[in-house]
Image: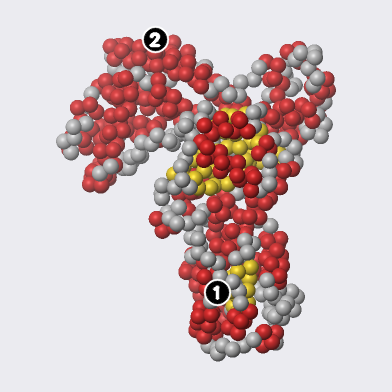
């Protein structure tokens, strides 16, 4: 890490003053044009060069000469020691607002001084005149300024979230997921769910790199240290939802073992958005071979640039909609379903292309048995995609997710009975190509066996979110049969009283389930707490996956060394920075540094 330079009062002779950031870093600020430079520029040669080139002056001024400089605003109290005003509040706020929009749009910091400001100055000169251009010129939008603004806004947003966590009446829920960026750096992302006032809030918590290894202990240390750093006890966490390899973030991982050792009563859930992986584990040999054939075909086309170009040209020539195939991936929920559907719908055209290239894959690809297996897989993964898509939303809790999974698995017996009767209505691609009874007989046996295995696997794997009969009042306290509740249950009286209220019934019918129970905290705190403890845990890592999509915009080839923690927080957080507080705090720090 480079050594930080220190301010020297002698630098005033170059018409510079000092601004101090939140982390204590000192930056030189030109009194004449209000430009703020990096800490590395805090040396006489750089300051003198700016003064001579930009302002055509001769160095040699002192503190007294600065005191006689007129202030831009009589109301400003900034830089009182020198009698010189810093930015006007409006210009300073404009700088923060632009930095905020820059982060929200995931743009590089240099876009301000390289593109936006020059364009704005030209527009101001043409439309509003030189006076407006001169005023606009004073807005500080350098790369370093934008970076520091985003850092300050990020810290303010984080502070708001931490304050909400501390004030939450219940323990919070956490979701964690890990990904690798384009520099092969492992990034751990976390979101938090907590109660604020009368609703459940979901917010970004952190995105931090795993510096060395990606073991469970490393993940746990990073997770724990974040709370210790901000002086929050780890037991504020009531549940953790993870996704990933079993050795690192899985349900039975080393990370989970460390968390349970520290917090024995914590609820651990695993992301329910990966039923595709379970299907792969239960595929019979022939179906598995068909899937691998599809992967090899896609890699043959997409993995070689000449083949890909010829493939696109071929499809443009024959006027087919799909000219670009998706890569098959192991870690994204919808990739398998999409590629299988595309391959099936483009089967004839791809077969022609493989023949044209004399590929060895032709023999397996044009086999009738392969096409039947492909149709079944495309249909099955399309159903799984629809299931996953129904759970890809904010506010998804384990109870709702479990209900969707249970409803999906309950369809299997109906599908099996129809398949046994050679009725392929639930598998439209398969129904489209089955033309003989012999073809129907051999595939029906395989499908029936696979659906049975898949059903057993689902029941054993996705057990989280199940409610016993006596707890189902959480879902609907008014239609629930209260006789299922034991008479010794202390909250039975509260439940009976709640059911008798017509006003609360109206609230239940018009509000989301989580919001309804949040609203009951003041009237029936025990019922609300019991219900929300079940509804609070995350069921998926959907928010982290959305965050990883934003990560792709920040970590690019041109920004590979970029520390993205602050930018990504400003970009994806729902919190809005408290601009007035940030500006006031910055001005106070500037005054103290003088």
Crowding at mark 2 (Cα within 10 Å: few <14, some 14-19, many 20+):
few
Q: Which quadrant of the figure has residue 91?
A: bottom right
Earlier sequence position, callout 2 versus callout 1: 1
Query: Residue shown at 68%/44% (left/top)?
Result: 232
Q: Which quadrant of the figure has residue 102?
A: bottom right
Query: Residue shown at 47%/40% (left/top)?
Result: 214
Q: Where is residue 555 drawn, in percent x and y?
A: 45, 52
Residue 511 versus residue 251: which sits nearer the camera?
A: 251
Crowding at mark 1 (Cα within 10 Å: few <14, some 14-19, many 20+):
many
Q: What colouring style does the render use?
A: secondary structure
Is 367 placed left or right of 206 in the picture?
A: left
Residue 96 versus residue 340: which sits nearer the camera?
A: 96
Q: Where is residue 438 drawn, in percent x and y?
A: 28, 11
Residue under label 2, please give it.
421
Query: Residue shown at 60%/49% (left/top)?
Result: 573
Query: Which label number is shown at residue 538?
Result: none
Q: Is residue 88 at all visible to an observer of this figure?
A: no
Instruction: Assign the C terminus to one quadrant of the image.
Output: bottom right
Q: Where is residue 153 drawn, in percent x and y?
A: 62, 57
Mark 2 falls on what kind of element?
A: loop
Query: Which label number is shown at residue 42?
Result: 1
Mark 1 falls on what kind of element?
A: loop
Q: Is residue 302 above or below residue 585?
A: above
Query: Residue shown at 29%/15% (left/top)?
Result: 439
């Amino acid at each position: 890490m480079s050594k930080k330079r220190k301010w020297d009062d002698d630098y005033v002779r170059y018409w510079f003053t000092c601004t101090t950031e939140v982390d204590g870093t000192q930056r030189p600020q030109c009194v004449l044009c209000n430009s703020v430079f990096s800490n590395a520029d805090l040396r006489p040669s750089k300051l003198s060069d700016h003064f001579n080139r930009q302002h055509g002056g001769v160095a040699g001024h002192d503190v007294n000469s600065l005191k006689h400089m007129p202030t831009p605003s009589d109301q400003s109290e900034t830089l009182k020691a020198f009698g010189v005003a810093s930015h006007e509040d409006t210009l300073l706020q404009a700088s923060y607002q632009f930095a905020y929009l820059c982060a929200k749009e995931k743009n590089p910091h240099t876009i301000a001084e390289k593109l936006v400001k020059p364009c704005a100055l030209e527009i101001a000169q043409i439309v509003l005149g030189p006076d407006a251009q001169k005023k606009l010129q004073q807005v500080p939008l350098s790369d370093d300024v934008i970076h520091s603004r985003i850092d300050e806004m990020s810290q303010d947003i984080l502070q708001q979230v931490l304050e909400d966590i501390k004030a939450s009446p219940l323990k919070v829920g956490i979701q964690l997921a890990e990904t690798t960026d384009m520099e092969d750096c492992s990034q751990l992302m976390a979101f938090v769910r907590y109660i604020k006032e009368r609703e459940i809030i979901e917010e970004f918590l952190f995105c931090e790199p795993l510096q060395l290894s990606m073991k469970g202990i490393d993940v746990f240390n990073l997770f724990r240290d974040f709370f210790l750093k901000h002086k929050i006890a780890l037991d504020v966490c009531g549940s953790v939802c993870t996704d990933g390899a079993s050795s690192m973030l899985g349900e039975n991982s080393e990370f989970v073992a460390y968390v349970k050792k520290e917090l024995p009563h914590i609820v651990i859930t695993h992301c329910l958005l990966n039923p595709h992986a379970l299907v792969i584990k239960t595929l019979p040999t022939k179906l598995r071979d068909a899937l691998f054939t599809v992967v090899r075909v896609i890699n043959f086309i997409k993995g070689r640039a000449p083949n890909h170009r010829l493939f696109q040209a071929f499809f443009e020539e024959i006027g087919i909609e799909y000219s670009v195939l998706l890569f098959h991936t192991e870690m994204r929920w919808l990739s398998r379903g999409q590629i299988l559907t595309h391959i099936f719908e483009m089967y004839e055209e791809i077969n022609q292309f493989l023949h044209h290239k004399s590929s060895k894959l032709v023999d397996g690809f044009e086999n009738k048995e392969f096409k039947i297996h492909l149709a079944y897989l495309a249909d099955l993964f399309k159903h799984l995609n629809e299931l996953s898509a129904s759970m890809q939303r904010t506010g998804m809790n384990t109870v709702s997710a479990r209900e969707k999974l249970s409803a999906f698995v309950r369809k299997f017996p109906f599908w099996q009975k129809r398949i046994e009767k050679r009725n392929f209505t639930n598998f439209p691609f398969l129904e489209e190509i089955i033309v003989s009874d012999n073809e129907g007989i051999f595939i029906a046996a395989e499908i029936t066996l696979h659906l049975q295995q898949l059903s057993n696997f689902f029941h054993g794997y996705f057990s989280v979110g199940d409610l016993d009969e006596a707890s189902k009042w959480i879902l609907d306290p008014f239609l629930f049969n209260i006789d299922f509740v034991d008479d010794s249950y202390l909250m039975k009286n509260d439940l009976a009283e709640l059911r008798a209220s017509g006003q609360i019934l109206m609230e239940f019918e018009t509000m989301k389930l989580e919001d309804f129970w949040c609203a009951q905290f003041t009237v029936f705190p025990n019922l609300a707490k019991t219900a929300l403890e079940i509804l609070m845990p995350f069921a998926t890592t959907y928010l982290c996956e959305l965050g990883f999509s934003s990560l792709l915009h920040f970590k690019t080839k041109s920004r590979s060394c970029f520390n993205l923690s602050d930018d990504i927080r400003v970009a994806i957080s729902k919190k809005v920075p408290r601009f007035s507080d940030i500006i006031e705090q910055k001005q106070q720090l500037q005054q103290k540094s003088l």
